[in-house]
Image (tube, helix red, strand yellow):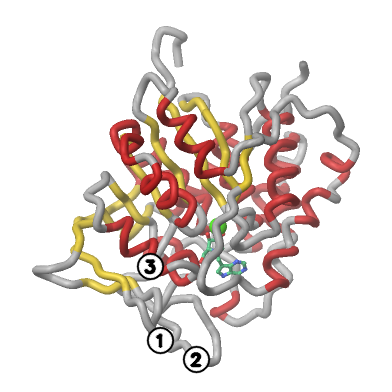
Amino acid sequence: MNNSQVKKKVFLDHDGGVDDLLALLLVLSMEEVELIGVSVTPADCYAEYAAESSRKFIELMLAKPVPVAISKARGRNAFPEVWRAQPQIINAFPQLLNMKSLRSPLSELEASDFIIEKLLNSAEPVSYLLTGPCTTLVTALKKEPKIKEKISEIIWMAGAVHVHGNVRTYTHNGNAEWNVYWDAESAQWLIEQNLPLTIVPLDATNHVPVTFDFLKKMAAQNEFEVSQLASLCWAITVNTIPGYDYLYHMWDVLAVAYVTRADIFSSQQIELEIAQHLPNEGETYTQAGSGSWVNVVTDVEKDLFYDYLLKQSRKNFIRV
Ligand code: AGV
Ligand code: CA
């Protein structure tokens, strides 16, 4: 892109899963966007670990620092602890382990206050990328409704509209997706706000599992440092039980790709409502006539998406 073009401003609100960090890596590789801040919600992670890996990824990819803030949000339903500990493996990678004096600061503000500050101070409206539960964003919107005017779009990996969900607990019927289930009350509030909201639900992400075929293509371009780091991150997701239910998907990476590559996705406006109680707490179901209108991504041209990921990974780390 030429310098006279203004870059799209983006904010990333993630929850530290391995694919959240890969989503951050993808955003950091996008030439046409400017990342203005990162928030970490302690949902699918322990936030301190994920904030550390976020700051290190930024250090490797950008000359300009980007502040990272930690959220104090809590959901009604906690993520399994084995999932939450997984991102710490990334901090043990040799590319990251001995990094010191990071230029990107850990903000002293709690993440909802940080979001308010970043959005209010932005001259242009911001694309808000959300790859974990929406609780931190909802807290910010309730504290300072004026930030609505600074949000041009929200792209949220969430929900399972016409497909089965991925919550598997003793009391649940399995029809919810985890990011919604963590805090279904905030999710219902968010969809009622008439914001320009696009969700990327399991309906779309089910098309992009982490496959060995893809990992082989990434490994074939291992001479690029970004590919090497991405390969390692994907490799640690392969320790899942080889049944469909626990197969790792490129959930959040697919969602953030929408910000630059909406052209390869299909979506439709659907009226949604979110269940608040067991056995289907967190289910996102259609409610014609009285639901909230949401733009729902239903499909992606998956080969073009995988090609895009491979292309964006053919890069080396910056040297400053
Ligand atoms: O439901 C998908 C969301 C995404 O934001 N997360 C993982 C992605 O970051 C929760 C989740 C569902 N199944 C999982 C998850 C699994 N097997 N391991 C880790 N997290
Ligand atoms: Ca996530």
List the single residue furthest toward the right. Answer: 98
State the residue lying farthest toward the bottom.
170
Indicate the secondary structure of the residue bearing disc 3: helix
- When asked about the image quadrant of residue 73, the answer is bottom right
Q: Nearer the viewer, mark 3 or mark 2?
A: 3
Looking at the image, which residue is at 72% across and 29% down?
59
| In contact (CB < 8 Å): disc 3 and disc 2 | no
> How many other residues sit within 10 Å of disc 3, few (<14), some (14-19) or many (≥20)?
many
- The residue that label 3 is drawn on is 185
In percent of width and height, residue 216 lies at 68, 54
Pointer 1 local density, CA inside 10 Å: few below 14, some 14–19, many at least 20: few
Q: Name the residue under label 1.
A: 278
Q: Is there a contact, CB below 8 Å, between mark 2 and mark 1?
A: yes
Question: Left or right: 273 with respect to 23?
Answer: left
Mark linked to residue 64: none
Is there any visible trace of residue 304 in the rendered image? no
Q: Which amino acid does label 2 sit on?
A: Thr
The residue labelled by disc 2 is 171
Q: Identify the residue at horizontal 38%, vertical 67% (top origin).
A: 185
x, y percent for residue 130: 46, 49
Point out the image quarter for the N terminus. Answer: top left
**What whole-number distance in Å separates the C-alpha atoms at marks 1 and 3?**
13 Å
